Image (cartoon, rainbow, N blue to C red):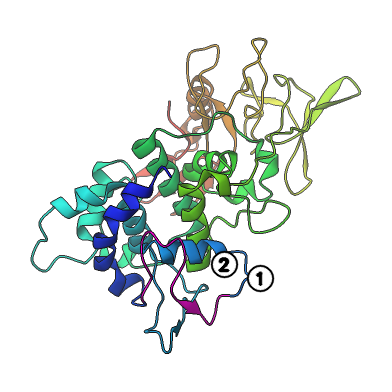
């Protein structure tokens, strides 16, 4: 097994985490079975095999001292950001963590955080070194960032192709910073959502049952799901294409219809010469070029600028965003003042003493 040597080595390191992630005995690293029965984990639970595997390897632990060989795992208990970062870092960079001296008075997770930062598992912007923040529950979208970065930087693994965003039922509710991570994790078969619709629940808090399953799939490719790469092709109605946002379609033109996840139909029009400006829809992800390339946020288009997304999911090229920021600015139409917090043209917010600030994407 690819990770066998790593798993044996990290058992010693796992003892450091045991007081935080649980204290129950986990069994031998080579046994392949847990020596512990958990009273709150049954064979019918979706995370059963994952919990048994992870505790048998000594990576995760129970939360109580076992009595007569029976303990508790507490699968519904939330996992903090510090805990999840530490477990993932332990798996892939345990020796690096072990090499660092323990600073007097430092938090138990300090060395794990330092290595995670150095290895690109996290960034200080997305996961600041703040004890209050790190001790709070890790959101599912933050989890996606951590696992995708860890696999890419530690093993070189990433998705060969991407599923359509239409396969993720609540795509629009995912923070724009995390969307590529979530889509990649779905495309790798590590994430499948919390229901049959593929709902991701991005701002939900990661719990110990979910964490065990995600870690299991990271380490054992054979346990991953088979991604559904089928796409909903655009249809032609009255000479205009209609497509579900994120699904495969041709380059858009005025009159085309974008169908959002909630069923809302948006007819594309031009504003300031930009197709779809102010519409709040993604018209780039899923575009199939003449070369057969499926575009997505972050790609470059014919003007040489990247395709960028705002916090509502609206996408344009960098050059288009530059035009929008100039054309939509309040001062262009003589609107120079406002009230604290006032929003103008979606992307501008007024702050007393500072004036209008642009909060859209920058090229």
Q: Quadrant of residue 79?
A: bottom left
- Could you tell me if the residues under marks 1 and 2 are in contact, i.e. CB atoms within 8 Å? yes
Front in this rendered view, residue 96 or 133: 96
Tell me if I can see residue 205 in this picture: no
Asked if residue 24 is positioned above or below residue 117 in the image, the reply reads below
Pointer 1 local density, CA inside 10 Å: few below 14, some 14–19, many at least 20? few
Specify the label residue 44 is tagged with.
1
Residue 306 % position (x, y): 48, 22
Residue situated furthest bottom in the rendering: 67
Q: Give x and y (percent) for residue 222.
A: 56, 45
Q: Looking at this rendering, what residue extends furthest in the front direction?
A: 31
Q: Is residue 34 magenta?
A: yes
Residue 336 drawn at (x, y percent)? 45, 39
Judging depth in this view, the residue of 343 and 297 nearest the camera is 297
94 is within the stretch colored magenta: no
Tag 1 secondary structure: loop
Residue 357 circle label: none
Give, as a single range, the part of the protein colored magenta.
Answer: 25-41
Q: Position of residue 265 (x, y in %)?
A: 79, 40
| 328 relative position to 87: left or right | right
On screen, residue 360 versus residue 313, left or right, reads left
Residue found 79% across the figure and 46% down from its top: 263
Give the position of the N terminus as an image quadrant: top left
Instruction: Find disc 2 in the rendering and name its residue.
Output: 48
């Amino acid at each position: 097994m690819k990770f066998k040597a790593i798993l044996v080595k990290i058992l010693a390191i796992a003892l450091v985490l045991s007081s935080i992630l649980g204290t129950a005995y986990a069994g031998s690293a080579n046994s392949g079975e847990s020596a512990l029965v958990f009273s709150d984990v049954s064979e019918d639970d979706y995370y059963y095999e994952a919990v048994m595997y992870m505790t048998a390897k000594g990576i995760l632990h129970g939360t109580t001292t076992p009595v007569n060989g029976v303990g508790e795992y507490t699968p519904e208990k939330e996992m903090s950001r510090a805990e999840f970062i530490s477990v993932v870092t332990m798996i892939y960079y345990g020796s690096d963590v072990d090499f660092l001296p323990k600073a007097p008075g430092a938090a138990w997770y300090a060395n794990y955080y330092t290595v995670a930062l150095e290895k690109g598992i996290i960034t200080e912007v997305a996961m600041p070194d703040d004890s209050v923040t790190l001790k709070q529950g890790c959101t599912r979208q933050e989890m996606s960032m951590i696992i995708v970065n860890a696999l890419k930087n530690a093993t070189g693994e990433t998705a060969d192709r991407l599923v359509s965003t239409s396969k993720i039922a609540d795509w629009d509710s995912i923070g724009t910073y995390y969307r590529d991570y979530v889509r990649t994790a779905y495309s790798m078969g590590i994430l499948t959502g919390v229901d049959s619709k593929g709902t991701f629940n991005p701002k939900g808090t990661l719990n110990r049952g979910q964490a065990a399953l995600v870690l299991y799939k990271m380490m054992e490719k054979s346990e991953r799901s088979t991604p559904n790469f089928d796409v909903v092709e655009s249809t032609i109605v009255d000479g205009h294409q209609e497509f579900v946002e994120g699904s495969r379609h041709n380059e858009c033109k005025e009159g085309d219809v974008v169908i959002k996840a909630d069923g809302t139909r948006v007819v594309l029009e031009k504003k300031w010469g930009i197709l779809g400006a102010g519409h709040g829809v993604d018209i780039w992800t899923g575009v199939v070029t003449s070369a057969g390339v499926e575009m997505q946020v972050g790609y470059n288009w014919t003007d040489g600028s990247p395709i960028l997304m705002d916090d509502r999911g609206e996408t344009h090229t960098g050059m288009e965003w530059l035009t929008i920021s100039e054309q939509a600015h309040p001062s262009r139409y003589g609107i120079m003042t406002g009230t604290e917090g006032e929003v103008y043209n979606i992307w501008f917010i007024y702050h007393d003493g500072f004036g209008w600030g642009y909060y859209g994407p920058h090229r």
